[in-house]
Image: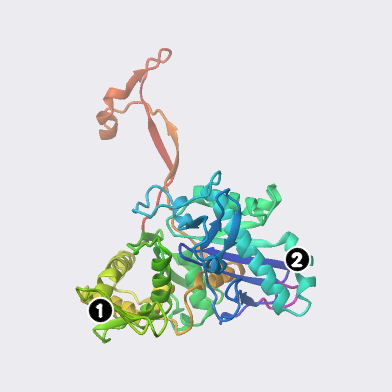
Amino acid sequence: MSSRSPYSGSKSTLAIAIDIGTTYSGASYTFLVPGEIPRIYDVTGFKGQENRESNTKVPSVLFYNDSGELVACGAETKKLGPKKGIRTEWFKLMLRPPSLRIDTPKVNLPPGRTAVDVFGDFLKYMYDCVRDHIINTHVNGNRLWSSLHGKAHFVLSHPNGWGSYQQGRMREAAIRGGLVPNTPEGCERVEFVTEGEASFHWCIEQAIAGAALKENTNIVVADLGGGTVDVSSFLVKATKPLRLQEQMAPECTLQGTIYHDSDYMETLGEEFDEDAKCLFREDGDAETYIRIGGRRDNFEDENGVCKIEFGLLEVQREEIIIAFEPSVSATVKAIQKHIAGRRDTVCHIFLVGGFAASPWMLSETRKRLKAAGIKSEVKRADSNTAKAVAHGGMAFYLDRNVTERTMRYTYGVSLQPGYNPSNPEHQARRHTLYTDPISGREYVKDGFFALVKKVSARG
């Protein structure tokens, strides 16, 4: 666990980190008390799954009636069964930038509601879950909440490929969800962290990156979530205090996940995600079994393609590998891109996120990187990594270890420079020349002067 100093502020503060994932979400929080060392708490026992206290994630799903009124969120939507209404999921992907293209399933928005409205509704649900967890698990929880929640600070995580526009829409959602007021002071209480950077802070927090935290060591973190693969890389510049330099613009890939619409496919997907996916390994059996019913449920179609025995659906190993292939391919490709040009330095690679729990994913990533001539160690945590982003987002808020970042874009100003016939670029734009009627000088239209240039990667 990372070593922290006692909080030096003069007033107690509540800080909350919320990770709205494509398929699952999580939340963590901390109390900043003057003179005390902050501790990070993970929210468990979400509404609808209170009997699973150790579960730090909840489905990113909402259910509205036909009038557009919110009926239930998260795990509580399962209790509704086939009730008529509008089931809304995958809504996070509607906020993505146009550059991140993917064929997503249709998102069913309730009438008169936008993706930002839905995002705000789910933020409010997560906020209420944090409130309930604080009140029910802390001594004097009611007093703590009532005295601190009105000025709480929020850290919202998002995929690596998102920028200021997406952050603005998330801040708007936080306002609509009632987390903060629509005032300058309220907006300042919401900040953002990429999922990749949050995951790296989680690695530090869990001590799995401890041996790698040496000066001039490169660290690559791949967050393998339900909808995206987020890869970030850092160089350790100093250890006491810890200072990290971002090595290149974080990578974000929308992986080819299998989408589902029906209640049956939802149940199948959840069972696979929570059990079979985590047990699937390189040297496993030819078949994998997914529980989809009771012990009395048996079925086999006439072609023998679909077979259910004692409530267990038999899935061939080759079929699972085909389903996993887009994710592992995207992960290895992104990691290679971050390591390129740095093979002569010590590099450590960490896998986090729900898919990192798969032994097959870990062994396959190691195998493919080794085949590509990359000898870096690939590790994952033994503890639950499913919602590392929320915990890591809170660690980011407390520690601020990344002190140098790469520029995502080139910033500059428009200008019309005087024509220079010896400049090849000016020659190529001769068709844009115009003559100033007063000075008689020729100028080139639509010029651009870079004030700060984009840094794709550090050498």
Which stretch is magenta? 32-38
Element type at mark 2: helix
Q: Residue furthest top?
A: 437
Placement of 78 over or under 178, stated as above or below: below
Would residue 275 be found to the left or right of residue 256 on screen?
Answer: right
Q: Which residue is mark 1?
A: 317
Q: Which residue is mark 2?
A: 148
State the image coordinates of residue 15 (x, y, percent, origin top left).
66, 66
Of residues 33 and 299, the one drawn nearer to the viewer in this rendering: 299
Residue 33 located within the stretch drawn in magenta = yes
Q: Earlier in the sequence, mark 2 or mark 1?
A: 2
Q: Residue at x 52, y 68 (%)?
A: 78
State the image coordinates of residue 65 (x, y, percent, origin top left).
56, 53
Q: Residue at x 70, y 76 (%)?
A: 6
Tag 2: amino acid? Leu
> In the rendered view, how is the structure colored?
rainbow
Q: Residue at x 71, y 71 (%)?
A: 32
Would residue 153 be found to the left or right of residue 277 on screen?
Answer: right
